Amino acid sequence: MEASRLIYMANQIARNFEALGHDQAALATADHIKMYWDPRMLAGIKAVDPTDMSPLAARAIAMVDGPVPHMTRATEFASADENDPGYNDAG
């Protein structure tokens, strides 16, 4: 995959998590990339000059090789008490 496409994708993921604040967004972006990107994609983005990425995406890529807490597991449901009157399973 071309470097420009990987940069675009990393920037888009980082932009998606921006609302979490810089630190949490960087962790969430790193987690997403670490969990879902093919190793060849990961190797490709690591070879890119970080100044070609958004600061948030560049920080996330720098974090990928270290321990990253799992924050973005889309397949896991939040635990909830279905008897709680405020419980809602919509979405």
Image (cartoon, grey):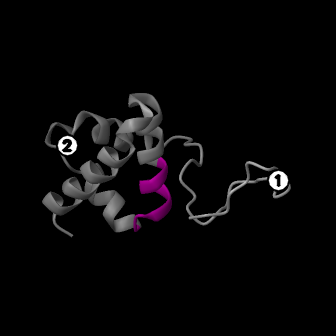
Task: Mark 1: give few (<14), some (14-19) or many (20+) Cα within 10 Å.
Answer: few
What kind of element bears circle 1?
loop
Disc 1 residue type (three-letter): Asp
Kindly identify which numbered label has been placed on residue 35: none
User: Within the magenta stretch, is there residue 15?
Assistant: no
Of 37 and 78, nearer the camera is 78
Which residue is found at the position 50% from the left and 60% from the top? 35
* Residue position for label 1: 81
Query: Can you say whether 9 is above or below 52 in the image?
Result: below
The location of residue 45, given as percent across then percent down, is 27, 54
Q: How many marks?
A: 2
Of 91 and 7, nearer the camera is 91
The location of residue 58, given as percent across then percent down, is 28, 39
Q: Earlier in the sequence, mark 1 or mark 2?
A: 2
* Residue position for label 2: 53
Which residue is found at the position 21% from the left and 53% from the top? 7
What kind of element bears circle 2?
loop
Single out the mark in the foreground, 1 or 2. Answer: 1
Residue lying farthest right? Answer: 83
Residue lying farthest front? Answer: 85
Q: CA distance from mark 1 to mark 2?
A: 41 Å
Residues shaded magenta: 31-38
Q: Quadrant of the C terminus?
A: bottom right
User: Within the magenta stretch, is there residue 37?
Assistant: yes
